[in-house]
Amino acid sequence: MMTYSPSIFHQAVHRAALIVAVLLLAMLAACQQSNAQNRSAAASQPTHSARAASMGIATFAGGCFWCTEADFDKVPGVVSTTSGYIGGTVANPTYKQVSAGKTGHIEAVQVRFDPAKTSYAKLLAAFWPTIDPLTPNRQFCDGGPQYRSAIFYHDADQRQQAETSMAALAASGRFTQPIVTELLPATEFYPAEEYHQDYYLKNPVRYAYYRGSCGRDARLEEVWGKKN
């Protein structure tokens, strides 16, 4: 029969405790290292607010915002587009109010773009061929000042670039009529109702029918010629 030895038992318990303690310290050190790496990685990546702040912003009115949004979504460097209302005197206008011409707003699209991939000058160049710049207070089948074409500048630099772009177009000899597209300071922009956002993606058949029946592309061909 084996003789029970308290000292041997206590030594075994002590060794086991030391092993557990060492394992716990190793696990703690590994967790701390992992957390430090995660914090370092997070710090090296720009935050959402920082990315948003680095984006450029531009606002264009080209008649029905469904079409203007669809056109700008195809432009390289454009990050997002938002259909909405700008230039009016009523806070939080609705589509029913604006389309009836009761608020002074214009249907427009706010464009956010990556300055590293495109520029405001390139957006201006992309905008002109998508509108009829010769007809006042309407675009295609949509009539009224709420559908007129306009460029809303957000600072002095955008204003200068827009003026230069318009002057170059006027001097190009392409048109015999004056350009009536307005240059206006950007005011409060109110996003349109959610069902208007990305309408051409959500309702492709209805969008195609509207665009065709409105005569948009036919008139653009008259004004600008056939696309290459």
Image (cartoon, rainbow, N blue to C red):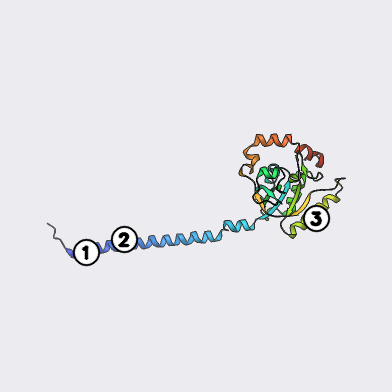
What is the distance, in whole Å, between disc 2 and disc 1 at their CAs? Answer: 15 Å
The residue pinned by badge 3 equals 164
Q: Amino acid at mark 2?
A: Val
Using the rendered view, name the quadrant where residue 138 is placed: top right
Work out whether mark 2 precedes mark 1 in sequence or the reverse, and give the earlier one: 1
- Viewer-side label of 3, 1: 3
What is the distance, in whole Å, between disc 3 and disc 1 at their CAs? Answer: 90 Å
The residue pinned by badge 2 equals 20
Residue 152 placement (x, y as % from top left) = 73, 53
- The count of marks equals 3
Q: Amino acid at mark 3?
A: Thr
Residue 42 placement (x, y as % from top left) = 53, 59
Q: Nearer the viewer, residue 96 or 179?
A: 96
Q: Nearer the viewer, residue 179 or 145?
A: 145
The residue pinned by badge 1 equals 10
Work out whether mark 3 precedes mark 1 in sequence or the reverse, and give the earlier one: 1
